[in-house]
Image: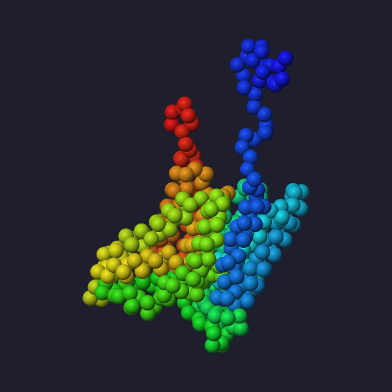
Amino acid sequence: MPTSPTQAAAAQGQDRLFVGHWPHLRARDSVPKIMWSVVAALVPALVASGYFFGVRAYLHVGLAVATAVVTEAVITHLRLKKATVGDGSAVVTGLLVAFCLPAQARWFVPVVAAFVAIAIAKQCFGGLGANIWNPALVGRAFVHVAYPTDLNPSAYPVVNSFSANVGTVGHAAPAIDAVSSASPMAHLKLIASHGLGFDASPAKLAETLPSLWKMFIGQVGGSIGETSALLLILGALYLIYRGWVRWQVPLVYLATVAVGALLLPIPLLTAGEPILRPAILLPNHELAVRFAAYHLLGGGVMLGAFFMATDMVTSPLTNKGMLLFGFGCGALTILIRLYGGYPEAVCYSILLMNTAVPLIDRWTQPRIFGHKK
């Protein structure tokens, strides 16, 4: 006697395959597990931000996270949806929003950015999994336009201990353990706009830019969570090891930025006259390599490449699509940095490529077995 629908169909001479609604593949991973792991991966950079920029960095992170969680809870309640605060996605968004902001911005800036990120960029599209843009970057882009003075200060105080007060926008409070200076990206923008001496040396470049070691560990001016490449890479390596971040996007992103910095023409000063030539043509190749390294370690490239561009919802699904997406993010970043009006370009580069993700997925769909491409 047949014991299943398939056997019953076979007994009646019918060639049918009955497929139930249960999934064929099951995984132990879940949204809360992944999201809270991302939070854990960001904790080292979060702890370091308080050391580099003072207690005010923690205040901004707390305000952004609290605003993101409360906004998500209220909106899901109003939409009569199941509460999703416990999955950790709102906490991740709040953290990333705060990481994109300077520590000396006014207190309400992270509140507005986090509200826009959750209410508009996430919930207006249907919640987690339905948004087309990275919510944290949408929040950052909004406050960048709304409060340009806060997002583009003339100087970033770098604090060496918790005893120093960060002070107001663009100025550090008097303290012997606080140094206020422009960000490395501002100096790189000046080089890209006004030229780099053809006969310059690495020592001369170091007069205006901090050492690569300081940029690697994060003891330079910048936004709260973007300066320490070391800690961001350590957190990202854990996520890559667990399989929650695909290596293709950050690798191609970083490689494109580095190659673009070396090969795209910038003004090189010869006898006082600027000539557009690639940095790789400098007689001092160490200077060219340093120029590319500064673009990799400065600004939000590391944060964007490892934690923004790799967002599971707003990045491509196919392997080829990930490579194309990473290339697009890197190309837009270095093009805007060298020839655009902003010294930083990670935010807008990723948002523009987020917009192209549906088309990239359509172009890079793998061929179905037995069908022509």
**Does residue 276 appear in the picture of this structure?**
no
Image quarter where the C terminus lies is top left
Way the structure is coloured: rainbow
Q: Is residue 62 left or right of residue 290?
A: right
Which residue of the protein is positioned furthest toward the front in this rendering? 1
Residue 364 in view? yes
Please report the residue visible at 67 percent of the width from the left and 68 percent of the height from the top.
63
- How many numbered discs, if any? 0
Residue at 58% x, 63% y is 42
- In the image, residue 211 sits, relative to residue 252, either above or below, namely below
Q: In the displayed structure, would residue 338 be above or below residue 26?
A: below
**Residue 67 at x, y percent in the picture:** 69, 64
Please indicate whether residue 76 sits to the left or right of residue 14 in the image.
right
Q: Residue at x 71, y 55 (%)?
A: 86
Examine the image and state in which quarter residue 297 appears.
Answer: bottom left
Residue 58 vs residue 133, the one in the foreground: 58
Is 290 displayed left or right of 224 in the figure? Answer: left
Residue shown at the point (58%, 81%) measured from the top left: 161
Q: Position of residue 12 (x, y in %)?
A: 66, 12
Give x and y (percent) for residue 30.
Answer: 65, 48
Query: Residue 117, position in %: x, y?
Result: 62, 59
Quarter of the image with the N terminus in it: top right
Q: In front here: 328 or 255?
A: 255
**In the foreground, 144 or 40:** 40
